[in-house]
Amino acid sequence: MAETKREIERKYEATSGTRVPDLTRVPGIAAVADRGVMELDAVYYDTPDLRLAADGVTLRRRTGGSDEGWHLKFPVASGIRDEIRAPLADTLPGELAGLLRSRVRGGEVVPVVRLRSARDVRHLQAADGTLLAELSVDTVHAERLPGGAEAGWTEIEVELADDTAGADEALLDAIGKRLRKAGIHPSSAPSKLSRALAETAPGPEAHAPGPRTDPGTAPATGTAGHAVLAYLREQADAIVALDPAVRRDLPDAVHQLRVACRRMRSAFKTYRKVLDRDVTDPVGAELKWLAGELGVARDQEVLTERLRGRIDALPRTLRLGPVRGRLRSWSAARARSGRRRALAALESPRYLALLDTLDELLADPPLRGPAARDARAVLAHAVLKDHDRLTARVDRALALDPGRDLDVALHEARKAAKRARYAADAATPTLGKPARKFAKRVKSVQSLLGEHQDGVVAREALRELADQAQTAGESAFTWGLLHGREEAAAAAVEGELPGAWAKASAPGIRAALTR
């Protein structure tokens, strides 16, 4: 069974003659315990085109040391990585293979580098003996596989202990300051693997992990095509990067992956004069499918949080019957089903085909004539067109009386607001502050409309919960009370909408985009 460890470390250049200074002079470190030298032997795996290395991901099979086994590392921030460990085996464990699926697809990983290290370990301890960090002096021998060039170096690595990983990095900063005073400077390589790849490269072009698209086909900088494709690549990269986070069930991962799908699909529609819709519409349909499969779990999570909050806000005297227990059991069954559905989608051939299609589209984009025009004019026009679409939908909704028709009209306006906001986000690198301000105003409208739609969904769920309670012989009073409060909340949103829309549709906001 795989386990996850947050790795927070710093690396420093060294030579065989480098002497580590007395680190007990660092505040908090009372003793340095010598733990001896261990021999480590690790084979690093990647795709033949080094796709994992291009994304800062490392996969190795290591023997020796206390943590021998398979290690998969994902970057979190500079000097911080999540390491997922699986027991030592001859072949890559299935759980780790799944976490690589969005990058490896239907291919395979192969050995690319072997690193043999002599690790001289010292434990940095507090006065009570608590392990604060581990410092190691690593003498590394790297060999390019199969049978390639070799290289060697010495480096110092300082890593926070597991039980201090939740603390800030002040201790590492203090240790680094002490090392620098002794003439020991930070390493320019972020990892042993990156250094090994660079120093054992067979040629100036063969080793370098590069983009998965051909830069030779990219339109000129400053054109609409260049701006739109840059935005689309961000979303495609986000989908690939968030896939393992969803599989690991990390907080907000499903939501963020779903947003990336929606942003890309929205951009296909907004910038249809830049990209040929005959090509992008089928891709957009597949993105809609993926977002829908992911959305079941996410929507249930949001709904449960909303209803739980409503219940908690009620005085105890108004909570009649086992309302918390019923909500918990009702939600748990739906959440399990939603997660199974999301994971099944990520394992499906349809999903892998979508990822390949996105790579192909970005490598050979179906550009139309306006793609070669000045980005500012083309993007501003597209954003304003989406705003006109939103205007029509909001105006229609504001003309309706409360009821089912209004609920539907506001939901349609919400989708238009999201599209207009995404259009402005995509245009922000080109249009700057006006697009940013435009997106902020539209987002306020989108948030209001989203709150209204969440209330519509909550009312439907409350009716279902009330029916279940009544069938089980429980009181349905609390569910009915919450339904009434959701109706009141919806009415409040409907009352706020005209003012929010007046700000988002102010002539000055629109005019600034075309200046």
Image (spheres, grey):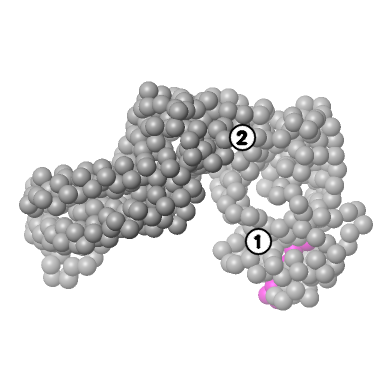
Left or right of residue 176, residue 78 in this image = left
Q: Which residue is mark 2?
A: 211
How far from the left and from the top, in percent, is residue 355? 48, 30
* Disc 2/disc 1 C-alpha distance (Å): 35 Å
- On the image, which quarter does residue 419 sit in? top left
> How many discs mark residues in the rendered view?
2
Residue 127 visible in the picture? yes
Position of 363 compared to 514: left or right?
A: right
Q: Nearer the viewer, residue 81 or 42?
A: 81
| Whether residue 155 is situated above or below residue 336 in the rendered picture | below
Is 312 positioned to the left or the right of 166 in the image?
Answer: left
Q: Is residue 119 magenta?
A: no
Amino acid type for the residue under numbered disc 2: Pro
Label 1 environment density (alpha carbons within 10 Å; few <14, some 14–19, many ≥20) = many
Q: Height in image: 465 above or below 339?
A: below
Residue under the image location 20 percent in, 45 percent down:
393
Q: Is 340 placed left or right of 468 in the picture?
A: right
Q: Which quadrant of the rendered structure holds the N terminus?
A: top right
Q: Position of residue 250 (x, y in %)?
A: 46, 49
Residue found at the very far front of the displayed protein: 515
Name the quadrant containing residue 451: bottom left
- Identify residue for label 1: 161
Question: Which of the pair 363/507 is nearer the observer?
Answer: 507
Task: Indicate which label's residue lies in the foreground, 2 or 1.
Answer: 2
Q: Which residues are magenta?
A: 121-128
SS at circle 2:
loop
Give me the residue at 81% from left, 35% from top.
Answer: 200
247, 183: nearer the viewer? 183
Lower sequence index among marks 2 and 1: 1
User: Residue drawn 50% across and 27% down?
Assistant: 365
